[in-house]
Amino acid sequence: MTDLVVTVVRFGFLLLLWFAILSIFNALRKDISGSSSGAVLFKPKTLKQQNEPRALVVIDGPAQGKIVNIAKHPISIGRASVCDLVLDDDFISSKHARITNQAEGYLVEDLGSTNGTWVEGEKLTQPVLIKPGVRIKIGRNTLTIRKVEV
């Protein structure tokens, strides 16, 4: 082979390598930015439904049965004693997540936890609006928002 052919082949391989690297970075960027599922977003049917008393209930895991009433103030979840819902679990950060009661529903946000907060099987990458009955996974515990019987 002549020097010209060898040089062209080298540049071809270099171009192919750069294309592969840029494709990998593009895929990683899309994966990191993520998108929240539209399946858990909703609009309330009636105002009365939003005024019903609700509670955050641990339905599965080591803390099963724990209940925290949801009022207008945000509910903090984590291992720290200052949290509204304290869960003793090695997979939960000291200040793991927050749930805020809003007119449109309940806003769930991860507070930069190590293992993440999961809503209906999807890892949160940004705050998401949910309705009662949606499953929230934090560490080894599964939580949901339910109507409180008065």
Image (tube, rainbow, N blue to C red):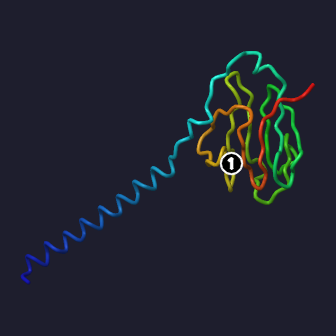
Q: Nearer the viewer, residue 139 or 18?
A: 139
- In the picture, measured across the screen, residue 125 lies left or right of residue 69, that is left
The outermost residue toward the bottom is 1
Residue at 85 percent of width and 40 percent of height? 84
Asked if residue 35 is positioned above or below residue 147 in the image, the reply reads: below
- In the picture, measured across the screen, residue 1 lies left or right of residue 68, that is left
Residue 111 quadrant: top right
Q: Could you say where residue 5 lies in the image, as x and y percent from the top left?
A: 9, 76
Query: On the rendered image, what quadrant is the N terminus found in?
Result: bottom left
Residue at 8 percent of width and 76 percent of height? 4
Asked if residue 86 is positioned above or below residue 146 in the image, the reply reads: below
Label 1: few (<14), some (14–19) or many (≥20) C-alpha neighbours in 10 Å: many
- In the picture, measured across the screen, residue 64 lies left or right of residue 7, that is right
Residue at 79 percent of width and 60 percent of height? 90
Residue 8 quadrant: bottom left
The three-letter amino acid code for the residue at tag 1 is Thr
Q: Could you say where residue 123 lies in the image, as x and y percent from the top left?
A: 62, 49
Query: On the rendered image, what quadrant is the C terminus found in?
Result: top right
Residue at 52 percent of width and 46 percent of height? 34
Q: Could you say where residue 53 lies in the image, as x and y percent from the top left?
A: 84, 25
Asked if residue 57 is positioned above or below residue 47 in the image, the reply reads: below
Q: Nearer the viewer, residue 148 or 97?
A: 148
Residue 45 quadrant: top right
